[in-house]
Image (cartoon, helix red, strand yellow):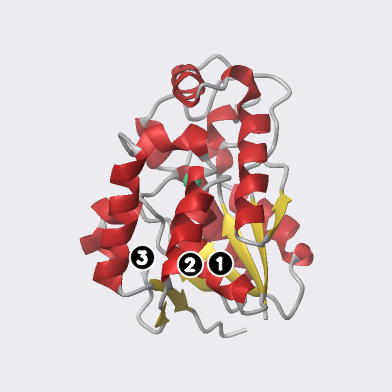
Amino acid sequence: MNWIYLSPHFDDAALSCGGLIWEQTHTGDEVSLWTIFAGKPVQYPRSPIIDELHTRWGSGLQATDMRMNEDIQSCRLLHASYHHLNWLDCIYRVDHQGAPLYPSQDSLFGKLNEYEAAFADILAQEIEPLIPPQAQVVCPLAIGNHIDHQLTRQAITKIGRDTWFYADFPYILKNQAEISNYIEKDWIAETYPISESGFQAWIRSVLAHRSQLSSFWKNTQKMENDFRQFLQIHQGITLWHSHSIH
Ligand SMILES: [Zn+2]
């Protein structure tokens, strides 16, 4: 089987599905992680969220290069290939006057800026021809409502092919009760068990995204505990399969 995981940002697929990706490549499946918003800005708008995140990541203006390298390492640990698309992360996107569209932490998890009303259509048109017909596409549910996660889901929905969906980690930890709001009634859930080796590979693949860890966890022990607890509760990693009418 040939799997394509759509990752809005460099770390999303590893965070949400790293253990499953390892299990799949371990049994001979081909897996590729496609980061959608992996573009490198030519110019940086002035915005509080950029300053805050670049400081937190310890990257300065090298953020995209640094995160790209982290992803390459992470994919290597999962025996998956990677593909970096050239769209900008929402923190770097601007209107025609150069004003940032998403300048604050709150704006990252809110409504799409009107300026981007047609963006999901454009994304769909760009992504569709890149997907081989036989590939199994895995897309985020967009739990947590991050702008770029919402756009990824909207684009794949517009493409209208059979798709698998994953729960966005770690946002799912805080929004467990809401998960049914993100799943269509006729979708089929499939839970895949994760071996101890798969679990260890999952942790290593997340640790490879080291600039990102402080956004979510105080230390690596707390991080590992969250993943261990998640697996104990869910008995594996679940994907939901949509049945397209097309
Ligand atoms: Zn993300």
94, above or below 163, in the image: above
Q: CA distance from mark 1 to mark 3?
A: 22 Å
Label 2 near label 3: C-beta < 8 Å?
no
- Residue 222 image offset from top left, x and y in percent: 28, 44
Which amino acid type is shown beneath numbered disc 2? Gly
User: Mark 3 — residue?
Assistant: 182
* Comparing labels 3 and 2, the label whose residue is closer to the camera: 2
The C terminus lies in quadrant: bottom right
Whether residue 230 sits left or right of residue 135 in the image: it is left
Could you say where residue 227 lies in the image, as x and y percent from the top left? 34, 57
Give the label on residue 137, or none. Answer: none
Image position of 219 (left or right of 92): left
Residue carrying label 2: 198
Residue sitting nearer the eye, 49 or 82: 82
Determine which residue is flagged by label 1: 21
| First reached walking from the N terminus: tag 3 or tag 2 | 3
Spatial CA distance of label 1 from label 2 is 8 Å
Query: As rendered, which of 238 and 161 lies closer to the eye?
Result: 238
- Whether residue 21 is situated above or below residue 43 in the rendered picture: below
